[in-house]
Image (cartoon, rainbow, N blue to C red):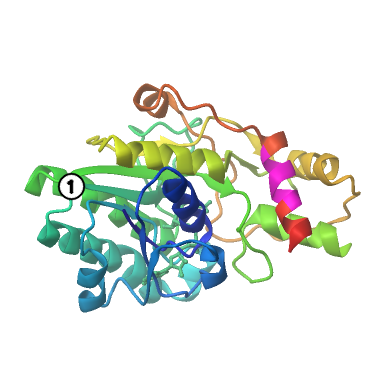
């Protein structure tokens, strides 16, 4: 299995799980936002470099039968600062991965899109049949990430699955950089005794999914070579406001949080919640890890850092 972006948060958790299930794993990652130490102790083939490097990517496909494509420049604000870099890594990068996979006759590709594609669509929960209206260059690039592999089913008969991740959290998701996600940012501030920065009034809500649950679904999709003609939401229809999240984090850590409110960020949607009907029908056996347990495991990882 080739995991692009395998030194990142989700990719390194997937590499561990896949290897525990007996898979041989190859990782290509340019370490732009990932960390080689995420792969410490894993006996896998690591190729440092970009998916935009055609020769390196062809090398990475050597002996590979399935691809989980996670490499991307994440973050809405990053894409607003530098839309071209986001497009290159996420849109052009996805096309490069598909072309390299096609050239090698790889049998299955899983790709990681994002709930941000729904953008201006106010419907809740979000079903995959709802219209999409991206609000940021990042969301546009993720539309390409999901639509190319689906088009490759029709154009080339390639089996593929395009997931829309919502807010994934868990061990190995780091804080301490300007584009960090909300849960690591909050835990990091809590541990330092600093106020938790809340963008807006705290009423923004998200459908948080624990990384262990996401990786089980990714591995299952890959092992079964599951193909589906439409994107699939990978979240379980939960709805947690930032203020509720803070209360959960206080319970998980046994600490008391101070909060500082900031302006809402441009491009951020107010509410996000998945319709998980399609996910449940494709993965009837999956049991998601709840927020309480997931946050406990995440806080425990931060305490070990
Ligand atoms: P991450 O930043 O930790 O991982 C992405 C990895 O891709 C990093 O290791 C980075 O170094 C690597 N990368 C970036 N550009 C590259 C390039 N050109 N060539 C090779 N490697 C490159 O982020 P993550 O949270 O693990 O996200 C994984 C995927 O899931 C991404 O595609 C992201 O867009 C998608 N996603 C994540 C979330 C979430 O909540 N974490 C939500 C929606 C979508």
Q: Nearer the viewer, residue 159 or 20?
A: 20
The spot of residue 218 in percent (x, y) is 40, 42
Mark 1 neighbour density, 10 Å: few (under 14) some (14–19) many (20 or more): some
Q: Is residue 57 above or below residue 269?
A: below
Q: Nearer the viewer, residue 271 or 95?
A: 95
Q: Main secondary structure of the magenta part?
A: helix
Judged left or right of residue 294, residue 66 is left
Please give the name of the residue rendered at 59% of the width and 67% of the height, measured from the top-left corner: 179
The spot of residue 268 in percent (x, y) is 56, 54
The quarter of the picture showing ligand 1: bottom left
Please give the name of the residue rendered at 29% of the width and 67% of the height, measured from the top-left corner: 93
Q: Is residue 241 above or below residue 194?
A: above
Please give the name of the residue rendered at 84% of the width and 44% of the height, measured from the top-left corner: 250
297 is within the stretch colored magenta: yes
Please give the name of the residue rendered at 39% of the width and 57% of the height, measured from the top-left corner: 70
Q: Is residue 107 above or below residue 39?
A: above
Magenta residues? Answer: 294-300
Quadrant assignment, res 46:
bottom left
Quadrant assignment, res 5:
bottom left
Judged left or right of residue 26, residue 181 is right
34 is within the stretch colored magenta: no
The spot of residue 55 in percent (x, y) is 20, 77
Q: Nearer the viewer, residue 197 or 22?
A: 22
Q: Which residue is mark 1?
A: 107
Q: Nearer the viewer, residue 267 or 145?
A: 145
* Residue 173, visible in the rendered structure: yes
């Amino acid at each position: 299995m080739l995991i692009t972006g395998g030194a990142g948060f989700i990719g390194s958790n997937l590499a561990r799980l896949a290897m525990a299930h007996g898979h041989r794993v190859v990782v290509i990652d340019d370490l732009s936002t990932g960390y080689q130490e995420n792969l410490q102790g894993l006996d896998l083939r690591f190729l440092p470099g970009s998916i935009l490097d055609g020769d390196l990517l062809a090398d990475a496909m050597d002996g590979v039968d399935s691809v989980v494509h996670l490499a991307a420049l994440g973050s809405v604000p990053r894409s607003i600062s530098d839309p071209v870099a986001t497009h290159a890594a996420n849109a052009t990068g996805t096309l490069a991965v598909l072309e390299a996979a096609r050239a090698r006759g790889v049998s299955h590709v899983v790709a990681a899109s994002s709930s941000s594609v729904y953008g201006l669509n106010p419907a809740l929960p979000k079903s995959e049949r709802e219209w999409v209206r991206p609000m940021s260059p990042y969301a546009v690039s993720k539309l390409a990430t999901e639509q190319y592999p689906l088009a490759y089913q029709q154009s080339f008969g390639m089996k593929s699955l395009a997931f829309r991740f919502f807010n994934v959290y868990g061990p190995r998701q780091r804080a301490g950089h300007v584009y960090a996600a909300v849960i690591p940012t909050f835990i990091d501030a809590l541990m330092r005794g600093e106020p938790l920065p809340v963008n807006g009034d705290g009423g923004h809500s998200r459908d948080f999914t624990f990384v262990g649950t996401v990786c089980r679904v990714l591995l299952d999709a890959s092992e079964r070579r599951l193909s589906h003609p439409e994107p699939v939401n990978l979240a379980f229809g939960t709805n947690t406001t930032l203020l509720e999240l803070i209360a959960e984090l206080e319970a998980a850590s046994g600490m008391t949080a101070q909060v500082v409110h900031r302006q809402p960020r441009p491009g951020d949607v107010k509410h996000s919640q998945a319709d998980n009907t399609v996910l449940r029908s494709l993965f009837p056996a999956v049991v998601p890890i709840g927020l309480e347990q997931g946050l406990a495991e995440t806080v425990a990882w931060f305490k070990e850092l």
